[in-house]
Image (cartoon, rainbow, N blue to C red):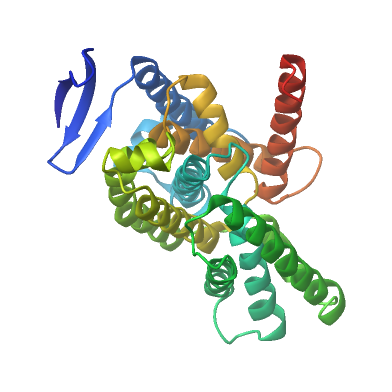
Amino acid sequence: MIVHADLSRGERRPVVRLGGAVTLPVHRRSVLLTVALVLAVGLASVATLTIGKAGIPLAELPAALAGGAEGSAEFVLERLRGPRLVVAIGTGLALGMAGALFQSVARNPLGSPDVIGVGSGAGAGAAFFGLLAPGLIPVPVGAVLGGGAAVLLVYVSTGSGFRHPGRLIVAGIGVAAMSAAFTHYVVYVAARDSANVLSAYLNGSLAARSWEHAGTIWLALAVVVPAVLMLAGRVAVTELGDELADSLGAGPRSARVWAIVASVALSAAAVSVAGPIAFVALTAPNIAKRLSGAPGANLVSSGLTGALLLVLADLAAQHSPIGERLPVGIFTMAIGGVYLGHLLIHEWRKGVL
């Protein structure tokens, strides 16, 4: 990793070059935010492993993490909370980065992969293969297929693929509505007696996660994130408009298509291990951008914000006094609702609404 100064506009702006393909601008406030988010995720992780009757005593945690866990501490770290925590961090990273990519290329701060039907399609796939065709394939695989089918339908129905964000959002809303209608039909009419087996999954859940789930989400991150970082510069330029981006050689149309493909891939990976968790992909990039004050997609800080939100939501889900073993998706919905309410009041006071 080499840090250079970008003098193309007569000002010294540090950039980080990773090899010859990836160049990322460095904003000091963003760097400080990234460090703060890493520390916050670390503290939330410690809380996840230590709080509660089944938690590992704080004094024993370093030895347990170093491989010296025994008895109940080993069970908590290896079976009960360790895999769940690693899945939560990876899923939050994937959703935060997916939302940041989508919002950047769509030029819409209220956009997310859910807008084009990924979450609703995943729910429909899970309902179909979990209730109408049980045992044919695993429910998580069915969810990924459902999300992929929804995105493919959106791609075809726009008439121009992923090139026009406006058409994409309109088509996505329609496909999401149809997918949700199908899910409700299956759950409440076709298989109402056995629908409880899917209730947690359809709301997004991190319960009973294993190291296999952790390996799935982190493998997806290892494959997709390098490609996302290579796209970061082109995606940032597309925010200036297609005409200017074209003149700068950014290829905005192809950059938009590949960014949406990467966003869908990250979302599908998250759905495969945790179900369709709502609002993380929407709120994490907005929060990260407001905190950093930096232009562009803010991919790293958005991913870390998503990880922090999901770890905190899961911590609340594990220790909530208002319900036993509530799915984490219920808490992310609450977080999203509070944030959108705050945003509405903020914009109204500014006179934008």
The relative height of residue 301 versus residue 328 in the rendered view (above or below) is above
> Quadrant location of residue 230?
top left
The relative height of residue 327 versus residue 109 in the rendered view (above or below) is below
Would residue 306 be visible to someone looking at this image?
yes
Q: How many labels sit on residues?
A: 0
Would residue 56 be visible to someone looking at this image?
no
> Quadrant location of residue 62?
top left
Rendered residue at 41%/43% (across/down)? 242
The relative height of residue 179 versus residue 34 in the rendered view (above or below) is below
List x then y, in percent, for residue 177: 74, 63
The relative height of residue 182 versus residue 74 in the rendered view (above or below) is below
List x then y, in percent, for residue 92: 50, 44
List x then y, in percent, for residue 57: 50, 31
Q: Nearer the viewer, residue 83 or 233?
A: 233
Rendered residue at 76%/29% (across/down)? 341
Left or right, residue 211 beside residue 174: left
> Quadrant location of residue 258?
bottom left
Rendered residue at 75%/70% (across/down)? 183
Q: Nearer the viewer, residue 62 or 309?
A: 309
Q: Image quadrant for the N terminus?
A: top left
List x then y, in percent, for residue 82: 46, 47
Left or right, residue 258 beside residue 307: left
Q: Image quadrant for the C terminus?
A: top right
Q: Which of 209 and 1 is in front in this view?
A: 1
Rendered residue at 59%/73% (across/down)? 139
Q: Which of 229 and 95 is in front in this view?
A: 229
Q: Pick out the residue farthest to the top.
A: 11
